[in-house]
Image (cartoon, rainbow, N blue to C red):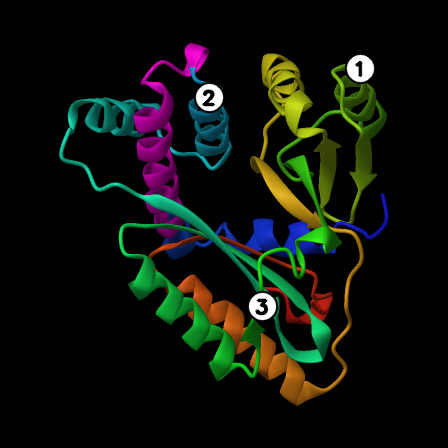
Amino acid sequence: MSGHSKFSNIKHKKEKNDAAKGKIFTRIGREIAVAVKAGGPDPDNNSRLHEVVLKAKAANMPNDTIAHSIKKAAGDANAANYESITYEGYGPGGTAIIVETLTDNRNRTAAAVRAAFSKGDGNVGSVGCVSYMFDRKGQIIVDKEEYEGDADDLMMMALDAGAEDFKDAEDVYEIITDPDSFTAVYDALDKEGVPMESAEVTEIPQNYVDLTDPEAVKKMRRILDLLDDVDDVQEVYHNWNEPEEDEE
């Protein structure tokens, strides 16, 4: 697979922040509610819910919080009807951005997403305009500081379980799977006690775009920060090759 894992490194570092963790838990809770409403409260008989639960566990969401979220979703007949809407668009320098949302007010969400793009001199495009530049894959991140085992052993463990690729980056190991093999690989690593920093089915860029103009970098950051502040936004994927020295 082309590209490298800098994108995921940045993501996993930012998610260590406590405030970011709280926001992630809120978003995962919303995903749980949608999954329960669509397929029931039993993760063993609801593959979408099972996938969200794995994501929640990797994000260190407490088990009792996960169970409470499932129970609440199953028993709340008056819960909001969330609609899944994906927006695609362009940022500075032709960067590609995908925004996944869950909303109970389509007009509110569309306005907020468009405003975020426009304030950074970007623009929302039509469905499919940039998604072809990404591959939908399962992605598991293992922090080297948390994993005490051998890299080769971890790689063989992942590949034997069905992983497609294994990357040894500066501070993490990145394991890539086909979406259908994600759960099997996760379960194999979890059984061996491998600590996972994050685990989810995500959109991975096929190639990355460099921004050399400081003003373009500033505008790109503005778009991403504004999107992160939109409550309805669940995930934001982009192909900007963010400079390492600017990592948080």
- Camera-nearest residue between 202 and 39: 39
Judge from the rendering whether residue 21 lies leftward or rightward of residue 128; answer left or right: left
Image coords of residue 162 (percent x, y): 76, 19
Q: Which of marks 2 and 1 is nearer the N terminus?
A: 2
Residue 160: give its label: 1
Judge from the rendering whether residue 79 lies leftward or rightward of residue 230; answer left or right: left
* C-alpha distance separating marks 2 and 3: 32 Å
- Quarter holding the C terminus is bottom right
Q: Looking at the image, which residue is at 33% across and 38% down?
A: 29
Q: Looking at the image, which residue is at 32% across and 45% down?
A: 26
Residue type of the residue flagged with mark 2: His
Q: Which of marks 3 and 1 is in front?
A: 3
Secondary structure category for the residue under label 3: loop
Secondary structure category for the residue under label 1: helix
- Quarter holding the N terminus is top right
Vertical relation: 216 (above or below) 133: below
Q: Looking at the image, which residue is at 72% across and 52% down?
A: 132
The magenta span reads 22-45
Q: Which of the 4 quarters of the picture holds residue 92?
A: bottom right
Residue 238: give its label: none
Which residue position holds label 3?
A: 125
Which residue position holds label 2?
A: 50
* C-alpha distance separating marks 2 and 1: 22 Å
Which secondary structure is most common in the magenta stretch? helix
Q: Which of the 4 quarters of the picture holds residue 175?
A: top right
Instruction: Say few, some or many: other residues with alpha carbon within 10 Å of mark 3 (under 14 / 14 to 19 / 20 or more).
Output: some
Residue type of the residue flagged with mark 3: Gly
Tell whether position 122 is magenta: no
Tell whether position 36 is magenta: yes
